[in-house]
């Protein structure tokens, strides 16, 4: 057995290195499928499974997988999902394959987060975040080149030869949404690192300014609405925590300069440098097909009744009906409406059966093999999950995701259980977005991986640390 050869004196450190290697591999995988081995794109897609099986077996061998109480909860959730998710299938040969692939899409990366919380310390997370900052430089160069060169050039090619146009660079990956989550993760790493510095000299300050400038440039070139909306949320949370945390005044001023001054200035300079790209990204803000959302189809308008109180005569109270036309609102704010539609998944319940169509039935890989696109795919995850697992269990599954996010935010905001809040807050926003609306069960791509990976980094903050608190 290979595992017997890895029975070394410090298996925890070995496991950390393997996990970091796998993180890098998940970026390299997209490059292999896009540019270097496109004729093996299907085989490469499943190659990660063998790496993960090895990691899971190695972690299990040294008791780095099931030791914590949360491990038992995850196992219970997985088993329950598999049981309810199997009911919708009739289990002919095609359904058996669909069930296996659907289960894989839901849970392939989940055990990875358990391993991280067993073996990663706060210092490990800090080191990993710092390493990621250097990944920003080649990332920025690649996105610029993809934006500059036409679609038929090698740098914009993909494994199916029709990935994306230079108008929306996909960087290392085979489609844009992966790129969006990678950018948001790097942005989280930047603010986690920069806002937890205990000392910022001139050299370090210039380095942070350069990184900020590069990230703002990437944001504009990607032309992703999610990058603007959720990137803005990361920045606002970072500002809030910086203001309330007690720090030496000079240090706090430098950090506030990064968020309040340098970030908007960097964005403004990049918008001038890439003016055409910036204009296109602005044009994309409200271009969603809002008419097709379940929210609009089931709720054409909402009537709200609010009291209009006459402050000068307490005996007089006039009630007026304020009517808000949801269709009109969504026509002018379609990106916001898309987020609301995803969170307000209740509109899809009446079109869902009790037990659903089967786990993963609406995922990209299952719809590909069954040639059946019954579900809204990709960016309507909660509606799809409801259709797959049924309203009986699907509601519980989605609500559990929401409760996890609420619980994590309450822990960070109102308790002292997490000592290093300033560092972890950007990651908290990233994880919150990922679990509320991110397609973490849609495909076994970099998206699902980075969501579970980031959750592991975040939950590791609950471990007892002897390091300084931020």
Image (tube, rainbow, N blue to C red):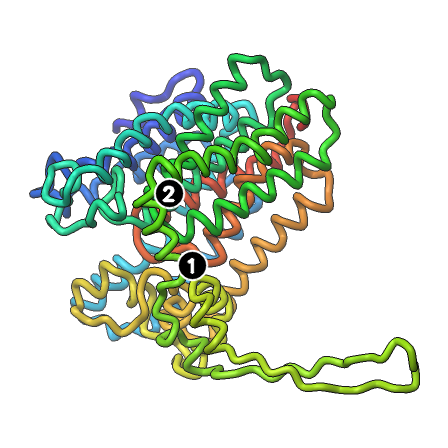
Q: Position of residue 26 (x, y in %)?
A: 29, 37
Q: At 39% from the left edge and 22% from the top edge, which residue is drawn?
A: 14
**Marks 1 and 2, how far apart at CA:** 42 Å
In the structure shown, which secondary structural element does the residue marked by tag 1 occupy?
helix
- How many discs appear? 2
- Visible residue check, residue 315: yes
Residue that mark 2 sits on: 220
Can you tell which of label 1 and label 2 is closer to the viewer? 2
Q: Position of residue 276 (x, y in %)?
A: 30, 45
Q: Residues within 10 Å of mark 2 (few under 14, many from 20)?
A: many
The C terminus sits in image quarter: top right
Looking at this view, name the residue that lies furthest to the left.
Answer: 39
Residue that mark 1 sits on: 79
Q: Position of residue 443 (x, y in %)?
A: 30, 54
Q: Residues within 10 Å of mark 1 (few under 14, many from 20)?
A: few
The N terminus sits in image quarter: top left
Where 332 falls versus 186 (above or below)?
below
User: Do residues under tags 1 and 2 come within 8 Å of each other at their CB atoms?
Assistant: no
Q: At 46% from the left edge and 51% from the top edge, which residue is drawn?
A: 434
In the picture, residue 93 is in which quadrant? bottom left
Where 201 falls versus 374 (above or below)?
above
- Camera-nearest residue between 2 and 86: 86
Going from N to C along the chain, the mark reached first, 1 or 2, is 1
Q: Is residue 404 left or right of residue 363?
A: right
- Residue 241, disc: none
In the picture, residue 43 is in which quadrant? top left
In the structure shown, which secondary structural element does the residue marked by tag 2 occupy?
helix
Q: At 39% from the left edge and 40% from the top edge, which residue is drawn?
A: 271
Q: At 55% from the left edge and 39% from the top edge, which residue is drawn?
A: 426
- Visible residue check, residue 446: no
């Amino acid at each position: 057995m290979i595992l017997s050869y890895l029975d070394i004196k410090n298996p925890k450190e070995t496991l950390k290195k393997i996990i970091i290697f796998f993180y890098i591999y998940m970026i390299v995988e997209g490059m292999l499928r896009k540019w270097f081995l496109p004729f093996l794109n299907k085989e490469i897609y499943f190659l990660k499974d063998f790496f993960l099986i090895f990691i899971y077996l190695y972690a299990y061998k040294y008791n780095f997988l099931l030791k914590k109480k949360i491990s038992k909860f995850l196992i219970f959730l997985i088993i329950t999902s598999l049981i309810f998710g199997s009911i919708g299938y009739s289990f002919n040969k095609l359904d058996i394959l669909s069930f296996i692939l659907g289960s894989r899409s839901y849970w392939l990366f989940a055990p990875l987060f358990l391993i991280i919380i067993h073996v990663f310390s706060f210092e490990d997370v800090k080191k990993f975040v710092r390493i990621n900052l250097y990944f920003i430089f080649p990332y920025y160069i690649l996105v610029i080149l993809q934006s500059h060169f036409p679609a038929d050039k090698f740098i914009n090619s993909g494994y199916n030869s029709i990935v994306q146009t230079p108008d929306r660079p996909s960087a290392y990956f085979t489609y844009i949404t992966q790129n969006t989550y990678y950018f948001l993760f790097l942005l989280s790493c930047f603010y986690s690192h920069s806002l937890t510095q205990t000392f910022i000299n001139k050299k370090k300050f210039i380095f942070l300014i350069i990184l900020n400038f590069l990230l703002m440039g990437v944001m504009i070139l990607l032309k992703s609405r999610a990058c603007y909306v959720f990137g803005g949320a990361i920045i606002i949370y970072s500002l809030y925590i910086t203001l309330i945390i007690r720090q030496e005044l000079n240090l706090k001023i430098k950090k506030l300069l990064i968020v309040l001054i340098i970030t908007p200035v960097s964005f403004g300079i990049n918008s001038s440098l890439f003016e055409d790209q910036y204009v296109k990204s602005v044009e994309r803000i409200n271009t969603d097909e809002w008419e097709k959302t379940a929210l609009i189809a089931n709720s054409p308008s909402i009537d709200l009744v609010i009291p209009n109180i006459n402050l000068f005569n307490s005996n007089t109270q006039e009630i007026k009906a304020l009517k808000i036309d949801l269709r009109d609102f969504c026509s002018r704010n379609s990106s916001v409406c898309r987020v609301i539609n995803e969170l307000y998944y209740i509109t899809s319940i009446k079109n869902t059966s009790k037990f659903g169509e089967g786990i993963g039935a609406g995922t990209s890989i299952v719809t590909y093999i069954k040639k059946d696109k019954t579900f809204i795919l990709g960016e309507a995850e909660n509606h799809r999950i409801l259709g797959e697992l049924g309203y009986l269990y699907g509601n519980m599954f989605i609500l559990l995701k929401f409760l996890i996010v609420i619980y994590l935010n309450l822990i960070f905001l109102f308790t002292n259980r997490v000592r290093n809040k300033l560092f972890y807050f950007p990651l908290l926003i990233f994880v919150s977005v990922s679990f509320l609306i991110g397609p973490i069960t849609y495909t076994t791509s970099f998206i699902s991986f980075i969501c579970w990976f980031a959750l592991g980094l975040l939950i590791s903050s609950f471990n007892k640390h002897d390091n300084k608190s931020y």
